[in-house]
Amino acid sequence: MIEIRRLESDGGEAVFAAVDIRRGTRFAAELPLVMVPPVSDNDEIPEFYRAIDDLPQEKSAEMAQLLGHPVVTESIKKDPQVRHEAWSFYKAKKWKSKEGTHLQGKKLRRAVTRITNLCAVYLAHNVQLGPKGKYGSGVFSLYSRIGHSCVPNAYNSWNPTLERLTIHALHDLKAGDQIFVNYTGNVCRTRQQRAFSLAATWGIICSCPACTEPAIDQLRRRMLIMDQALAAYTCGASQEPNFSAIYGVPRIVTAKEALKTAEELSHLLKRQRLCGMELCKA
Ligand SMILES: [Zn+2]
């Protein structure tokens, strides 16, 4: 149902619908190339090195082919922690390779470079599996080639039963349409908030309608406020009398007010064809 094509604009790869795809269709269910179990931030890189050491050669070769933004991946490769953890990994293994041969000199440096390069791919492409990474994180060959849009036409989620990342069409797609997901997690964010995380994490400058049309940014600003007000109502934070003065977000206290806000938020989401998790939550 889908195909990977090279983009003429920047030579990068992207995913397109190969046929017409109906809204709601699950067009991909992908196994991870590598998976890291749920661990604290400090343990993530050492866990990744352990996972990569167990990985069959063809999977690490496939992973090495995934491109990230050069500025982002180069800065990860030079990151002192990423390099330090790679040396520590081989030290803990008594300077031995996966096959058990002793590594030293050039061979050891090459092995360290190889795993730090793969770590850069992992950090640039990993997806949290389940809410807040409940099932860990993984890198996916197809998913990594799907572009970002703040007005996405597809939605991805980890299916713990299938143990695969599933990707569904949010709208009817025509053959030849490029497929986009939202990398930033929540669409109820302002252009400035999205621009910061997109540039820092993926080196992306987004030019979707929500990032270029001021009227849409106004809607997103309104959606952010409603999303935060509803979150505060749900967790009980809005019970605090000075809530609005402290957080600059309207105080929702009654169920009736919450319903009215959720209805308005749903309306704004549907108006922009944002039919993902935010609409479900609202
Ligand atoms: Zn955008």
Image (cartoon, grey):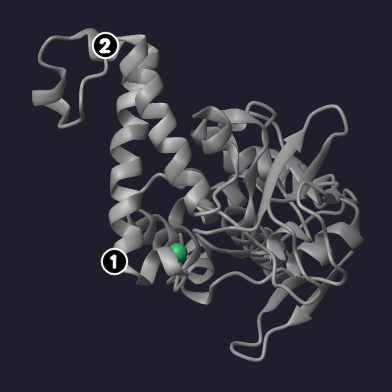
Q: Is residue 95 above or below residue 199?
A: above
Tell me what residue is drawn at x 66 percent, y 72 percent. Answer: 67
Q: Which mark is residue 214?
A: 1
Q: Indicate which quadrant contains ligand 1.
A: bottom left
Question: Which quadrant is the N terminus positioned in?
Answer: bottom right
First in sequence: mark 2 vs mark 1:
1
Q: Residue 127 carries which label?
A: none
- Which residue is at the front of the view, 217 or 107? 217
Tell me what residue is drawn at x 38 percent, y 66 percent. Answer: 211
Please identify the residue farthest to the bottom as the structure is shown.
8
Q: Name the residue under label 2.
A: 253
Dividing the picture into quarters, in which one does residue 257 lie?
top left
- The amino acid on which the numbered mark 1 sits, given as a three-letter code, is Pro
- Which residue is at the front of the view, 150 or 140? 150
Q: What element carries label 2?
A: loop
- Which residue is at the front of the view, 193 or 22? 22
* Gap between marks 2 and 1 measured at Cα: 31 Å
